[in-house]
Amino acid sequence: MNRFKTSKFKNTTPKIAKKDGWINNVRAGSFSCQGSHIKASSKLVAFNTEQAGGGMLGLSSVKPGSDGQWTVMQFSCHSDLVTDLDFSPFDESLLATCSGDETVKLWRLCDPEQQQPSSPELTLRPGQGRLELVLFHPTSSGLLAVGATKSPLIWDTSRQDAPLAVLEQHGDQLQSLSWKRDGSLLASSCKDKMLRVFDPRAQLTPVQSAKSLQNNKDSRILWVKDDFLLTTGFDMMRSREVRLWDSRKLSSSVSSMSLGISSGMVIPLFDEDTGLLILAGMGEAVIDCLEVSASDPFFTQVSHCLTDTSSRGVALVPKHALDVLSCEVMRVLQLTDSCIVPISYQVPRKQSSQEFHEDLYPDTVGTTPAMSAEEWWKGGNKQVEKVSLQPDKPPKSKAAPAKKKELASGGSKEDPARGCSTSSSPLSTPSSSSAAPSRSPSSTSGLSSGFLPSPSQSTKALQSLLGPTSKFRHIQGAVMHRDTHITNLRGLNLTTPGESDGFCVNRQRVAVPLAISGGQIAVCERSQTGRLPDTAMPTVENSVNVVDLSWDPFDTQRLVVAGDDAKIRVWQIPEGGLKETLTEPEVLLQGHTEKIYSIEFHPLASGVLASSSYDLTVRLWNLENGEQVKLLTGHQDQIFCMAWSPDGKLLATVCKDGKVRIYDPRKSTAPVQEGPGPEGHRGARVVWVCEGKYLLVSGFDSRSERILSLYSADSVSSGSIACTNIDTSPSTLIPFYDPDTSVVILTAKGDTRVHIYEIVAEDPYFMECSSYNSPEPHKGLAFLPKSECNVRDVEIAVGLIITKTAIEPVAFRVPRVKKEFFQDDVYTDTAVSWEPALTASAWLSGSNGQHKKISLKPKDMTPVSEAPKEAPVRKYLPSSVYLEEKTDEQKKEELLSAMVAKLGNMDEPLPQDSFQGVDEDEWDD
């Protein structure tokens, strides 16, 4: 049995058009931009020209006129260089352009012989500076991916005011974008050598990313076979190369091929139907054609075409414009300095030239969009209906309703006076539904039962490949309705020390330091939302700069403030909020000799407070009598953070001297454990996780990258048991840990991204979840007690985010289908953390306690674990043979028959034996 694959395209021959078939009178420019210089629809071809500084485009037709000649004209479309262009896959006359003038324009073009429109049908102004890339969505009408210098934008052109999404900012120049053929994912390559794959509807950050490219010069990326990505670029020796990647694992390429040393970038073009890949080196007179396969050998050379002149750009002509009766499977348009050269790729066949070869032309995607941009954004996954390329073949009957819909909606129609396609909207292309593909009985398993295999099998296979995943991985952060915001905050203090969270919240109030002399703090009632008055509001006046502040977890009216005068002030806020400025604290704690770093309340005992200071000590205070009760020593440098264990017995600290320490304050003033902490000295935070069995430390490594480290609380001296790198940024990540779900939410002052992980007590320890991105940098994020979560919306955490002028609630929700039921797998009984378990004196005397727990289940909700079980929908194969029970022998016989049928008859000829060859005298010289 022959194990080598034979391709039906192995003899595909490139035929360069004769010179009288070239599109002449072209003045192509040589410009520095990341986009394409030439694109084609089934009707038109547009290209860059050197006129008007690159702000003009050239336009011609794909096919010559009746006299055999091409008309070439130029039209002005931007005030600066046109950096990229793309034709709509659903409208052969709709062209999108972007430019250095920071705009995206949509043009409805006419035939080259006609006068072109003087203004675009639509102009988008993202406000992101110079735009480099523009790309139509492959399945949805009116949807664009736009590449700014460092950020990809997703834009519904029916909503001109703002993009649907601004994806995570890249570390350097964005170099290329590519949609997956089914429209679900967007891939990018960047000058920072990173490959990224985005699911824009799920999250603004990449679902996969890796620093995979070896050189930052001129990379290009394309989706090819199914989940495979292809990149062209340069290796470390500046030799050009092409690589194939599995998009689910970007850390290493599946295959690579060197293309030799040259300075020009390589432009890839891929035909999904044939699997043929075009590689054209800019500035070179060579165009290669390869066949790409999803298995070894991944690359097979098909042809090596030497052209008359060097390339400025290349474009593929859509399949619908090919000469299928001449076995033309692909046509490339080569842009040169003075002309466009058509290159036809034909498969030699011996039969009549008027015969249509179905094996060369599988059904290809049609020109009717599957859905609108809005449908896609809401989660639609419809695919474009496929059509046959066979001439005069009647359309499928189910396509008729789509045509009626197009006419009824006033879609594109031809204006005979102008030779232009007109429409009420640049994106009035109709949507159509594609039927779910039927499944063949021969492709199924479980023949003895007659049922199709479980749809979850592929998911389970993927999970086994990628490892364990968190049930919170699709968590979604969302700012709550504007009615819940507190706005018109003025004069906020945005320079609190890094050891402070910057502001604090409880169930009733928010305390925010102000940038006003005297260390003033604004106290806002959460029940009084809306716009604050422009007049001065009453404050808490500390007379010194505020370095940290915290609400008493058991008293919503008690606010504790640490000042840079080494004193701690305890304030009592009146019921109903401040009516006048407070100037005299209820209690003044004195003992530290230098400025205080931070303060931390005990989680169980009322009135127990810990404070750290520049005097390198940690002191414990009893607020019941205002006295210092403990003094902890052993730190050699700045104390970054303190954290009480969940049972209230131990206190952990992380210090600039590179140590993590654990104290048992009631037994010793020295640490009972000490181990190595983060290598970086910019800052760090610590929190207890996994029922107090582990310490999670957020800090920096030796290269100043932000990292998370996990320590066993029983063996801190052994160092961290697991680490994960987050990103590079100067601000320390502040963690919030939810003990009920073991989810940690991290962000830093000045960041826009909120990172989310589930922490588990075994490998892989860190399970990354979807992150949340705020539209602008926030100044802090603080969280409310678990009782503030709306369980009907499956909220697992609710925080308040502070911006320059507002306080906005943000809810973190877990998507669930049966939201009418109480999700008892998400909501375990939660601790009543707002009530003390014991007094300060009891804890100091050696007593321990624990919070009582309550269920968050509303009385009118049924737990999802008790929901009625739905009968599984069984899909029977269309056969009556399964109406009666079969014996074991019958089942074995059926199984063996199915296996033999799947493998095929070994005596039958191989598929390649039936391929048509050609006689030697039939080759075209």
Image (spheres, rainbow, N blue to C red):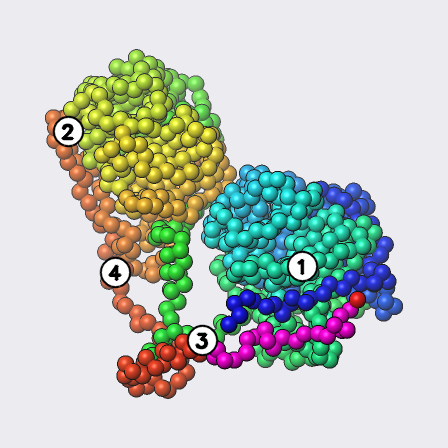
The amino acid marked with disc number 3 is Lys
Compute the Cα span from label 4 to label 3.
41 Å
- What's the mark number on residue 865? 4
Tell me if residue 921 is in the magenta stretch. Answer: yes
Q: Quadrant of residue 894?
A: bottom left
**Residue at figure coordinates x 48%, y 38% from the top left:** 752
Residue identified by numbered label 1? 289
- Measuring from the top left, give residue 907's x and y in whole percent: 50, 80
Which numbered disc covers residue 843? 2
Q: Nearer the viewer, residue 191 or 124?
A: 191
Q: Is 189 contained in the magenta span?
A: no
Comes first in the chain, label 2 or label 1: 1
* CA separation in Å, label 2 and label 1: 77 Å
For the image shown, how many numbered marks are present on the structure?
A: 4
Task: Classify mark 1: residues with Cα within 10 Å, few (<14), some (14-19) or many (20+).
Answer: many
The structure residue drawn at horizontal position 41% and vertical position 27%, both measured from the top left corner, is 680
Under mark 1, the amino acid is: Cys
Q: CA distance from mark 3 to mark 1?
A: 33 Å
**Left or right for 130, reference 780:** right
Residue 523 visible in the picture: no
Disc 2 secondary structure class: helix
- Left or right: 652 in relation to 812: left
Q: Nearer the viewer, mark 2 or mark 1?
A: 1
Pinpoint residue 426: horizontal percent, then vertical percent: 67, 59
Give the labeled residue for mark 3: 902
Residues drawn in magenta: 902-924
Label 2 close to label 3 by CB (< 8 Å): no
Quarter residue 128 falls in: top right
Mark 4 lies on a secondary structure that is helix
Disc 3 is placed on an element classified as helix
